[in-house]
Image (tube, rainbow, N blue to C red):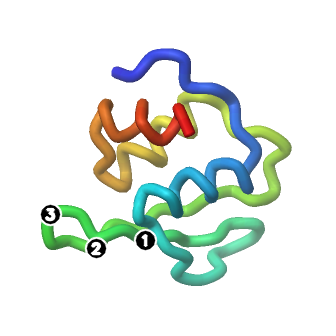
Amino acid sequence: MPKNIPSLKPKELILLLEAGGCAYLREGKGDHRLYFRYFEGKKRVAPVDMGAGELSPPYVLRIFRQFGFTDIEIDELLKK
């Protein structure tokens, strides 16, 4: 598991996701936006809570995992 995952604002997380190959899909329910990424031939979709002030490290890690990012990819994205 990657260490030192920071708390992120929703827009900061979206910039990291887009740098990793994710793209906007559509608005979800409430304050959520749905993003997608193709991984191993499958389309992965995950919601990002735009209404939150800051997203906790476990939430950020869960979003990365839903998109199929490896520990190495997560570390590389967080270094940017």
In percent of the image, x 75 and y 70: which residue is there? 30
On the image, numbered disc 2 is attached to which residue? 43
> Tag 1's secondary structure?
strand
What is the crowding at mark 2: few (fewer than 14 residues within 10 Å), some, or many (at least 20)?
few
Answer above or below: position of 6 versus 50. Answer: above
* Residue type, mark 3 in image: Glu
Quarter of the image with the N terminus is: top left
What is the crowding at mark 1: few (fewer than 14 residues within 10 Å), some, or many (at least 20)?
many
Q: Are marks 2 and 1 in contact (CB under 8 Å)?
A: yes
Mark 2 / mark 1, whichever is N-terminal: 1
* Residue type, mark 1 in image: Phe
Residues under labels 1 and 3: Cα distance? 13 Å
The tag on residue 36 is 1
Residues under labels 3 and 2: Cα distance? 8 Å
Answer above or below: position of 2 versus 68. Answer: above
On the image, numbered disc 3 is attached to which residue? 40
Residues 57 and 12: in front is 12
Quarter of the image with the C terminus is: top right
In percent of the image, x 55 and y 71: which residue is there? 34
Which quarter of the figure has residue 62?
top left
Residues 71 and 76: in front is 76
